[in-house]
Amino acid sequence: MEKITDYLCKYKDYIFAVGVTTAEYIDSLQNFEIRDTDVFLVTYPKSGTVWTQQIVALICESDFRDSALYPNNLERMPWLEYLEGRPDYSLRPSPRLFASHLTPALMPPGLRDKKAKIIYVMRNPKDNVVSYYHFCNAWKYLETPNSFDEFLQQYLVGQVGAASWFDHVRVWYSQRKQYDILFLTYEDMIMDLRSAVQQISHFLGRDLDEADINRVVEKATFKNMKTDPKANYEFLPEELLNRDKSLFLRKGTIGDWKNTFTVKQTEMFDRIYRERMGDLPLKFIWEM
Ligand code: A3P
């Protein structure tokens, strides 16, 4: 891996936080055996991963996680690319659930056989960069930015963990036909959580009845997840997450960027967004 700062290193088309994984392990994913029943949740960081982990975990557990098999969503749906605490995935019962921020080039090629399912969640990049900025203040593996403006510049050139938002969304979207993949936006989930839960359960081939859909929706609201110790990631040790600075469940809204972006930053961002994404048919909701 090529070190680019004290906190970040580049490998192929991706940027990792230093210390979370190795090139050898990422290469070994090329031989990772995919099962037909596997489900992968793929996101650019701060796009609603923890939220969708909760929804998918709830849908896939017939007893709605009352079983003691997995203590929390991180263990239920571990991160494919990270080495710390990694179980032997070949021993896991099906359905295996994985989360990942990786690009298609680094993912197991078996996914292209369209047997396993991928859910890709994306978020409007103005709220995404603000959420990411707050997260960098709290997450040990990432450098605390000196200012929002500095972080925004790094984000726009893709010098942040997971590299460029623009490239991530584009590459997954443009290769979508090679996968059995469901695209969702964070904003659609905010606007109509019930429909999102129905869509996900249908995609996973687990059409739930009305009562079960209601249970999932109830357990996936921001308010309930905040106090759900299996879902809110507050079980992470203080050395990893400085809770005084930020949390995984921070605000959970659309349009928080308006409290952070200056007029100048907004104009610049809008121009860059048009240049880089204008040719794609993707529509985001930017404010309520
Ligand atoms: P904010 O920082 O804007 O509040 P990720 O899980 O990919 O790291 O994304 C984190 C973002 O998802 C945070 O956004 C967090 O508040 C939001 N989020 C998590 N659970 C949510 C929920 N149940 N409803 C709405 N937003 C949620």
Image: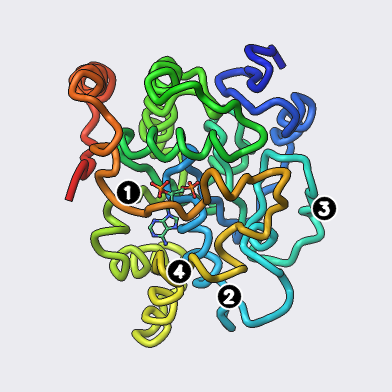
- Mark 3 sits on what residue? 88
Say few, some or many: other residues with alpha carbon within 10 Å of mark 2 (under 14 / 14 to 19 / 20 or more): few
- Mark 1 sits on what residue? 185
The secondary structure type at the circle numbered 3 is loop
- Mark 4 sits on what residue? 205
Disc on res. 61: 2
Q: Earlier in the sequence, mark 4 or mark 1?
A: 1
Question: In the picture, which quadrant includes the N terminus?
Answer: top right
Q: Nearer the viewer, residue 215 or 171?
A: 215
Disc on res. 102: none
x and y, in percent, of residue 266 in the image: 21, 25
- Which mark is nearer the camera, 1 or 3? 1
- Which mark is nearer the camera, 4 or 2? 2
- Which mark is nearer the camera, 4 or 1? 1
Tell me which amino acid carries mark 4: Gly
Q: Is residue 82 visible?
A: yes
Tell me which amino acid carries mark 2: Glu
* Cα separation between marks 1 and 3: 31 Å
